[in-house]
Image (cartoon, rainbow, N blue to C red):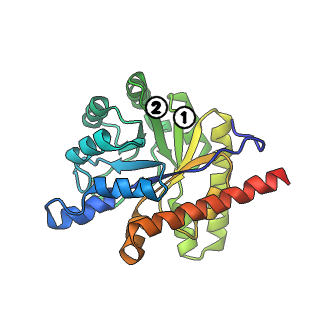
Amino acid sequence: MTTPETIMPLRLGVNIDHVATIRNARGGRHPEPIRAARLAVDAGADGITAHLREDRRHISDLDITVLNSELDCPLNLEMAATEEMLKIALEHVPNACCLVPEKRQELTTEGGLDVEGQRLSLQPFVSKLRDRGIRVSLFVDPDFDQIKSAAEVGADIVELHTGTYCEAAFAKDKTLFASELKRIEEGARYASELGLEVHAGHGLTYDTTPQIAALPQIVELNIGHFLVGEAIFSGLDSSIRRMRAVMDTARAQISGSKSA
């Protein structure tokens, strides 16, 4: 459990899915996700996230093989809770697996996993991953029932969905923004009290990251699409270094306020 006296460093996981999206738009090998992953680590990322979807719309099986064998940092394999993905995870044994909901027609992950409604199927799934030494994260909305269910099925980590919060910021909906930030703050505190490690992600930008980075229970942010998009204008190295600076500044401010 995180206390005000034990504020943990904040890690950055960079999701490289959309480097593969650009590659797949034309076919061939360029740009290579492994090259982006190495650059991300050099720029300040603590780990790499890659989502192997059922339809393989961006990251491929070969990408996972290359990333898992050649990276010197933790690989977080994002995936649906299916038998196909379980087999792949148990074959590769990444550092962590983040279980997410997945629908073929969606453009991106829409909302958190319904852990409460899938407890009977998720509990043995989580156990099989953990038995191989794989840390298990569940991507959930900042909802107490979902967070409690995540702890009960044996997850190590919850990643709190920040998508609605980021959409509210973009729409300049101050009421929704404030209520979603409060939900995330309370969800992070509750998850930590249950002994879960707390991550957050989805839709985070330079403008929306500081408030999330300032929540002491959250120890990792996973950000991808925004950083790859910004790389078009400033380069991937620059976009990641700027995000790293935004995170570190917000974390330093809460550390200073606790020690003042």
Q: Quadrant of the N terminus?
A: top right
Residue placed farthest to the front in the image?
42
In percent of width and height, residue 2 lies at 70, 39
State left or right for residue 4 relative to residue 105: right
251 with respect to 160 (left or right): right
The amino acid sitting under disc 1 is Ser
Q: Which mark is residue 149?
A: 1
Sort mark 2 into few (<14), some (14-19) or many (20+) by Cα contacts within 10 Å: some
Residue 131, given in percent of the width and then of the height, sits at 41, 21
Q: Looking at this view, is 211 or 46 the one in front?
A: 46
Q: In which quadrant of the rendered view does residue 166 lie?
A: bottom right
Residue 110 in view (yes/no): no
Q: In the image, residue 58 lies at what x, y percent?
A: 25, 56
Q: Is residue 163 above or below residue 122?
A: below
Give the structural element (helix, strand or loop) at label 1. helix
Q: Element type at marker 2?
A: helix
Tell which circle, 2 or 1, labels the residue nearer the N-terminal end. Answer: 2
> Residue 212 — which label?
none
Find the distance from the CA under tag 2 to the CA under tag 1.
Answer: 7 Å
Q: Residue at x 28, y 49 (%)?
A: 53
Whether residue 20 sits left or right of residue 227 in the image: it is left
Mark number, residue 119: 2
2 and 1 marks in contact (CB < 8 Å):
yes
Q: Quadrant of residue 151?
A: top right
Looking at numbered disc 2 in the image, what kind of residue is underneath it? Arg
